[in-house]
Amino acid sequence: MTIRGSLVLGAIFVALILVACESKERASNAEVEGRWLYQLHCAECHEKAQPELHRQPPNLHGLFLAKSLPSGAPATVEQVRETIVHGRGTMPAFDRLLSKEEVDDLLKYLQTMK
Amino acid sequence: MTISTRYDESKADQISVRYYAGWFGAGIASILAGALLTIGCQSKSKHYELRGQVLDKNLANNEITVKHGDIPGFMPAMTMPYRIKYPAQAEDVEPGDEITADVVVSKDGSDYWLEDVRVTDESGRNHAQPQVAPRMLMPGEQIPDVALVNQDGRTIHLSDFAGKALLVTFIYTRCPMPNFCPRLSSQFARIHNELKKVSDDYDRTHLLTVSFDPKYDTAPVLRKYGLAYLDGDQSGFAHWDFASTDAAHLRLLAQAFGLQYQEQDNQISHTMNIVLIAPDGKVAKFWSTDWTWTELMQSMQAVIHLTRVGG
């Protein structure tokens, strides 16, 4: 391989690393944003005992590790998105409060919760 | 009660999340520090500075009605009643006074009151208009016969419940704050379930939840919301209606029952109001703070009993 060829290969390698890093950073930012949204909008009900509520909202840790959601529905991203956006049971709808991007970030964070 | 304010601004722990939202990017150590800060903040009440003019004063319950400007982090400018913690401070304030005060929100966000009330300008006392706030009904006064549309899309009137003890409250189904609308509906559900145990009480009482978000809370939305609190039992709607009405009737109800609400950033700031209407169609009692479901239910049973005794 010529020196020129090596340089080109090296440049491609560095570019791939940079793209990978940026992509990872973006994912990480989404999770951080999702975590913040979770603390702001979800934790109050889903992390704390709410004895005055008709139903205690379920704990969401490990939500996607189980086959089904606490409601019995399949534990899929789309099912959880539906619940966040339109509400379910006594959980209010968040369609006017969260943008699509915010729901995406929140779902990314929920998938990291063990 | 309480006031419900914007979700992300009314509770100390939620606000604290905001404070250190920017820390998260700094790494895990900052997140842990933020979590510790949250725990610290949850143990304290929150203070906000209020500036405004006193429009009305009620010494019987240490309340003043204040027209105030924006209270950053708490609520937008509006006119609403506040309880003064120390009665002596209420005595020093007169309608027309410009005041400053600390709005204190309890650590669990379920109560609020004023402390450190100071009169900054009393020159407006002589020009004060009594009761500038919306005209609210007093116990013993007849309620207006407002038409509403319930969860089945059927028109109902407040007069339909004559002969029963009617407990009315106001919510919006999107309310994300557990201590506000969800708490109201949950406690109404307890009352509903308890009254169901005694058929005579059940037959002579009714619950009515009115939405102040009629654009979103259409009949199907209210039906779905109601069924969640009725555990899916549709027959419960015969005892508990979920309804909305047009803007004009909503304003009338709000004025009569002291409800204040304001939409901003897709959330609705509102007061929490519960009204008990006696079988004769007259207001029996109001609640905003310091109520329990047992007190509400016993008050309903008491007005039924009074009606029986009175013939």
Image: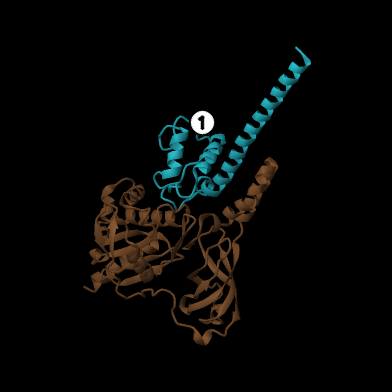
Chain colours: A cyan, B brown
Residue most extreme to the left: B311
- Which residue occupies the foreground of this view, A94 or B41? A94
Counting from the top left corner in percent of width and height, residue B308 is at 24, 69
Of B271 and B250, nearer the camera is: B250
Identity of the residue furthest to the top in this view: A1
The quarter of the displayed image where residue B114 is located: bottom right
* Vertical placement of residue B120 versus B287, above or below: below
Residue A69 shows in this picture: no
Residue hosting label 1: A65
x 36%, y 47%: residue: B228
Q: Secondary structure at mark 1?
A: loop
User: What percent of the width, then of the height, locates residue A84?
Assistant: 46, 43
Q: Quadrant of the C terminus of chain B?
A: bottom left
Q: Which residue sits at x=59%, y=43%? A: A33
Q: Residue at x 61, y 56 (%)?
A: B43
Q: Quadrant of residue B274?
A: bottom left
Can residue B134 be seen in this snapshot? yes
Q: Nearer the viewer, residue B289 or B170?
A: B170
Given the image, on which type of amino acid does mark 1 rest? Leu
Number of numbered callouts drawn: 1
In the image as oriented, which residue stretches furthest toward the bottom? B126
A106 above or below B219?
A: above
B33 displayed left or right of A91: right
Residue A6 placement, left or right of A82: right
Whole-percent x, y for residue B39 in the image: 62, 51
Subunit under mark 1? A
Q: Residues within 10 Å of mark 1 (few under 14, many from 20)?
A: few
Indicate left or right for B185 with B89 as reference.
left
